[in-house]
Amino acid sequence: MRFRKLKWREKMKNIREKAKKIRDKVSKKPESHESQIAKITNTTLEEQRREILNKGKKFKYPVQYSKNRLVINALIIAGVILITGASLLWYQLYQAQNTSEFVYRFTTILPFPIAKVDGEEALYSDYLMEYRANMQIANTKKDEIEGANNISALSTLNKSKAMKNAIANAYAQKKARELGISVSDKEISEAFDAQRKIQNTELTESALYKIAADNYSLSPSEYRRMFIELPLLRRKVTAQIDKTAENLKNEVSKYLSENANNFSKAVEHFGDKIEYAKPGKVRKTNIDGGRSKIAAGLKVGEASKPFISNSGDGYYIVKLIEKTDNEVSYESIKIKFTEFNKQLEQLEKDGKIQKYIKVD
C-alpha cells in the first residue's frame, strides 16, 4: 500500500513539472522585430555578403572572365602563328634559298643574317638586293650579256658575287665603326650627281631612278644603298687601312715629280708594284673610275695628284697626252689596294667567316 502511494506521488510530480514547462513556454514573449534585425545586423551580415559575392562572382562578371580567357587564348594562338611563321621563313631562307620579292621584303623588315665575318653579321637583305638586281639586269639585257640564257649558271655566279659583297660590306662597316669612318650626306649627293653625268649626258634625278627601276628593279633608297652608300664606305675603309698602298702612292708621286712626269721610267723603276695603262682616246664623260674627268682638267704633259677611283680599287695618277672639246687621251698608273682583301682572306683561313647558305 505504501509502495503504491510513493509511485502515485512520483507520477503527480512528473505531471506538475510538465505542466509548468507548458505554462512557461506559453507565457514566454516572442522576440521583437527590432531585436531580430539587430541580431542579423550585428552578427553575420558582412560575412554572408562576402560568401554570396564569392559564389556568384563568375555569374556577376561573365564578360570580364570571358575577356581574360580570350586574351589568353589570343596570346597562345599568336605565339603558335609566330613560331610557325618563323620556322617557315627560316626554311625558305636557309634551306630553300627562296629569292622571291615576298621573302626579300621580309628580310628588309627583319634583319636576318646571311653570314658572319669577324663577329659582324652580313645582312640577308643586302645579299638578296644585289642578287635580284643582277638577275634582273641579266634578264633585261639577255641578248647583250654572254651566258645570260644559262639561268642556272648565271644564278650561281650572281649568288656567289652577292655573298662576297655582302660579307665585304659587313666587314667594312665593322672597320668603319672601329676607325670612326662615316659617309656624309654631302659625299652621297656628290657621288649621286657624278652618276647622273654619264656619256656626255646629264640625267635628272627622276630619270636615273627610272633607269634603276627598269633595269635593276631597285627603288631610290635601294639604288642609293647598293650603288652609293655601301661602295663609298667600303672605299674609305679600304684606303684608310692600306698603309702599303699609301706609302707606295707617295713614292710614285715623288718619283714622277723628280723625273719630269715620265711614266715609262716610273714603270721600269717600280715594276709590278704598279699597273700602267697606255694612252688612248676616250670621251671626257667616259666611265673609267673618274680618270677621263681628271685628265680633262689637266694641261698637256701635266700629271695629276694621286686620287682614289670611283670604283675604289686603288690610287690613280693620270697624265694628259692630248684633248679636244669632247675627247681626251691620257696614260695612267694604278697603285692597287690589297690590304682589305688580304684581311678578309686571313679571316676565312682562321674560320672567322661563317656562311649560312651554300652558294657555290
Image (cartoon, helix red, strand yellow):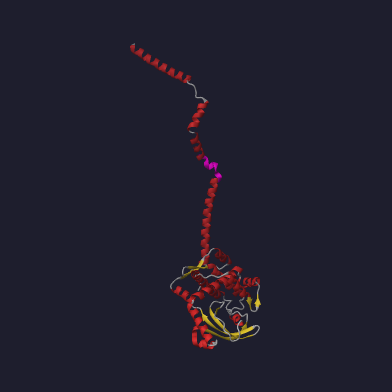
Task: Confirm whether residue 228 shows in the render.
Answer: yes
Can you give x and y, in whole percent of width and height, for residue 107 in the image?
Answer: 55, 65
In depth, the one of 117 and 308 nearer the eye is 308
- Residue that appears at 53% across and 55% down: 78
Q: Is residue 192 magenta?
A: no
- Residue that appears at 45% across and 19% down: 24
- From this viewpoint, which residue is outermost toward the top? 1
Can you give x and y, in whole percent of width and height, for residue 290 in the image?
Answer: 59, 79
Can you give x and y, in whole percent of width and height, for residue 270 in the image?
Answer: 49, 85
Task: Confirm whether residue 219 shows in the render.
Answer: no
Residue extent of the magenta highlight: 55-63
- Residue that appears at 54% across and 67% down: 125
- From this viewpoint, which residue is outermost toward the left? 2
| Label tally | 0
Where does the N terminus fall, quadrant-wise?
top left
**Above or below — where is 205 with respect to 6?**
below
In depth, the one of 294 and 340 nearer the eye is 294
**Above or below — where is 205 with respect to 271?**
above
Can you give x and y, in whole percent of width and height, for residue 112 in the image?
Answer: 52, 65
The rendered magenta stretch, by its main secondary structure, is classed as helix
Q: Is residue 56 magenta?
A: yes
